Image (spheres, grey):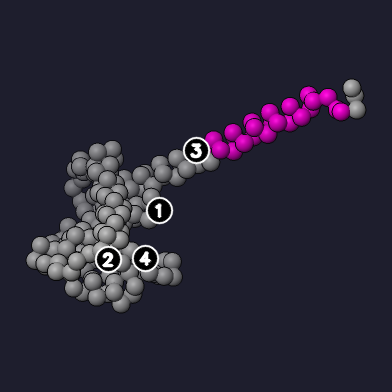
Amino acid sequence: MSISDDNGFVNVDRISWDNYNEANDLIACAEKYKEERGYYPERICADSIYMTLGNKKFCADHAIRLSGRPRKKQIESEVQTPEQQELFKSDMRKRSVIEGRIGTSKRKYGLDRIMTKLMETSRTVISMAFFVMNAEKILRLLRLLFALFLSMYFAMLCMCELWRRQAPLWAT
């Protein structure tokens, strides 16, 4: 399973039961992102399996910052500046959000207890779990917006009431 996080919403990029190397999904996901939005992402925070030479070359050619720990086979010989290290740390914090989404989907939405027998049914259950996850995010945003409008409404009511109660200056 390959998922991505876009502004707090989870997209399921690929669900497969075949033995495949996930590193091949990165280019397809970046192209899909460009097709949807018209531009490539600024950065991709990925696991070490995605740090192949082909993916690095693709990202360098398209001005995408591919951030992640290097593969164990590769030895980093270049020294990073403190700015690069801070950028890497911030990218890793963003990547931990994805890991958290996977953990939440297992713990709260039951992805660790899928017991369906057919592949299509399992895909449906997985997709529905992430759909509910995104729907709850939308509901949280709507609840926040409603609370904001409600507080503004009551603040305006109080201000209007205070304005009406004030005696005019010429009445004294």
SS at badge 3: helix
The mark total stands at 4
Q: Residue at x 22, y 64 (%)?
A: 80
* Residue at the disc numbered 1: 7
Asked where in the image residue 17 lies, by quadrant, the reply is bottom left
Q: Residue at x 41, y 70 (%)?
A: 39
Q: Main secondary structure of the magenta part?
A: helix
Looking at numbered disc 3 in the image, what kind of residue is underneath it? Arg
- C-alpha span from label 1 to label 2: 18 Å
| Viewer-side residue, 18 vs 63 | 63
* Residue at the disc numbered 2: 66
Residue 108: tell me if it is visible: yes
Nearer-N-terminus badge (1/2): 1
Looking at numbered disc 2 in the image, what kind of residue is underneath it? Leu
Nearer-N-terminus badge (1/3): 1
Looking at this rendering, what residue extends furthest in the top direction? 172
Nearer-N-terminus badge (2/3): 2
* Residue at the disc numbered 4: 42
Nearer the observer, disc 1 or disc 3? Answer: 1
- C-alpha span from label 1 to label 4: 13 Å
Question: Which residues are drawn in magenta?
Answer: 146-169
The location of residue 3, given as percent across then percent down, is: 28, 56
Asked where in the image residue 40 lies, by quadrant, the reply is bottom left
| Viewer-side residue, 7 vs 69 | 69
Looking at numbered disc 4 in the image, what kind of residue is underneath it? Glu
Residue 72, magenta (yes or no): no
SS at badge 1: loop
